[in-house]
């Protein structure tokens, strides 16, 4: 068969895809074979029923997810970065998780990054062919100067994305830690990584549409990794996001409510203390609970590794 496109623009695959049909993410779901006869409510019920299995699949990978979080935490402690790499839905979810870290945990935008095959434009318009180029993954990662202090998380729900493989291979050669996230069982032609996470969510309701169960599982895993790593860094006090970046009214309001919740101060007073703390909720909590100045509170927090609880315990206010 010729590999030249016909009038429709279709051409045969440019690489050996003979095993794609055997992938778990490409198999047909027997429970959804009749979806083209279902009502809207029946479709919603079916999708919801399938979605209920996702959390269990992720839970079975709990030890490997925790191992990945510990690696990310350790690299953060060294001043390193977390770089997500993916294509299509996987890439968008990595970029999304990276974008959510600064407002939630006050991290530097460079600390958690997302890299997607096809570049920024692929975030809003599919560029599916971009995932086929292994060398592009290696090149794009190389441009970020990844090194031994960094960790690269490759996301490929099908487990065979060349762009992701190229990036992970480049990361390993640069001495970075590596994590591979996919939704298929182990294969001979997989990529080497320090930790491999495999939430096996099974065939999709629409065959091969990994934006569904596999995408949801991916979001759950990424949430767990970055949230756990940031909590281990002292980015929360109790379950409150005390390192948030108050860049909008909603977050400024949340900052005030956090100080009210932890110290008993009123709303107006909370706003004044946070302003005196230079906008830092952490510093404001220590100030209000200990009576220390802003500078003294900052020094106490620094000595406690950034943990509010440890800082307060050192002053007998834990």
Image: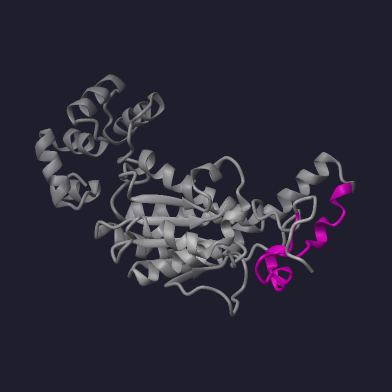
**Residue 244, magenta (yes or no):** no
Can the viewer see residue 178 in this picture?
Answer: yes
- 171 sits to left or right of 120: left
The one of 258 and 124 positioned closer to us in this rendering = 124
Q: Residue at x 57, y 55 (%)?
A: 130
Q: Which residue sits furthest right?
A: 37
Work out whether residue 240 can be spotted. no
Residue at the image point whose x is 42% and y is 72% from the top: 194
| Residue at screen point 33% across, 31% down | 246
Left or right position of 188 against 275 = right
Q: What's the colour scheme?
A: one colour
Please give left or right for residue 157 compared with residue 196 in the image.
Answer: right
- From which residue to which does the magenta span run? 10-36
Whole-percent x, y for residue 146 in the image: 33, 60
Q: Which residue is the extreme one toward the top?
A: 268
Q: Position of residue 66 (x, y in %)?
A: 43, 64
Residue sitting farthest toward the bottom: 188
Residue 190 percent across, percent down from the top left: 55, 74
Residue 263 to residue 1: above or below: above
Q: How many marks?
A: 0
Give the camera-side residue of 277 and 262.
277
Which residue is depicted at the point 32% across and 58% down?
145
Query: Residue 298, relative to residue 58: is it above or below?
Result: above
40 and 237: which one is in front?
A: 40
> In this picture, is 278 found above or below 116?
above
Query: Which image quarter holds the N terminus?
Result: bottom right
Which of 140/220 is in front? Answer: 140
Image-based side of 284 in relation to 106, left or right: left
Q: Measuring from the top left, give residue 317's x and y in whole percent.
A: 18, 44
**Residue 152 found in image quarter:** bottom left
Based on the picture, tell me whether residue 12 belongs to the magenta stretch.
Answer: yes
């Amino acid at each position: 068969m010729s590999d030249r496109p016909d009038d429709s623009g279709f051409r045969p695959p440019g690489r050996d895809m003979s095993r794609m049909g055997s992938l778990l993410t490409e198999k047909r779901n027997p429970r959804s074979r009749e979806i083209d006869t279902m009502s809207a409510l029946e479709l919603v019920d079916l999708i919801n029923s399938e979605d209920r299995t996702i959390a269990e699949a992720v839970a079975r990978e709990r030890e490997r997810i925790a191992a990945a979080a510990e690696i990310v935490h350790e690299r953060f402690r060294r001043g390193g970065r977390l770089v997500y790499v993916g294509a299509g839905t996987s890439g968008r979810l990595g970029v999304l998780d990276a974008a959510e870290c600064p407002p939630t945990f006050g991290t530097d935008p460079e600390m958690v990054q997302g890299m997607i095959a096809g570049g920024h434009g692929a975030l809003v318009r599919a560029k599916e062919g971009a995932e086929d180029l292994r060398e592009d993954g290696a090149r794009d990662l190389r441009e970020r100067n990844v090194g031994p202090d960094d960790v690269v998380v490759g996301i490929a729900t099908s487990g065979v994305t060349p762009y992701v493989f190229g990036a992970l291979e480049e990361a390993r050669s640069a001495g970075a830690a590596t994590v591979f996230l996919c939704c298929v069982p182990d294969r001979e032609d997989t990529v080497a990584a320090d930790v491999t996470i495999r939430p096996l969510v099974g065939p999709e309701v629409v065959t091969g549409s990994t934006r569904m169960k596999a995408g949801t599982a991916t979001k759950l895993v990424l949430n767990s990794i970055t949230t756990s790593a940031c909590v281990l860094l002292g980015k929360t006090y109790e379950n409150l996001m005390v390192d948030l970046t108050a860049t909008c009214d909603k977050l400024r309001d949340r900052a005030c409510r956090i100080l009210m919740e932890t110290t008993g101060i009123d709303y107006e007073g909370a706003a004044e203390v946070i302003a005196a703390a230079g906008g830092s909720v952490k510093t404001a909590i220590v100030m209000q609970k200990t009576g220390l100045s802003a500078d003294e509170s900052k020094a106490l927090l620094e000595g406690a590794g950034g943990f509010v609880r440890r800082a307060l315990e050192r002053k007998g206010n834990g």
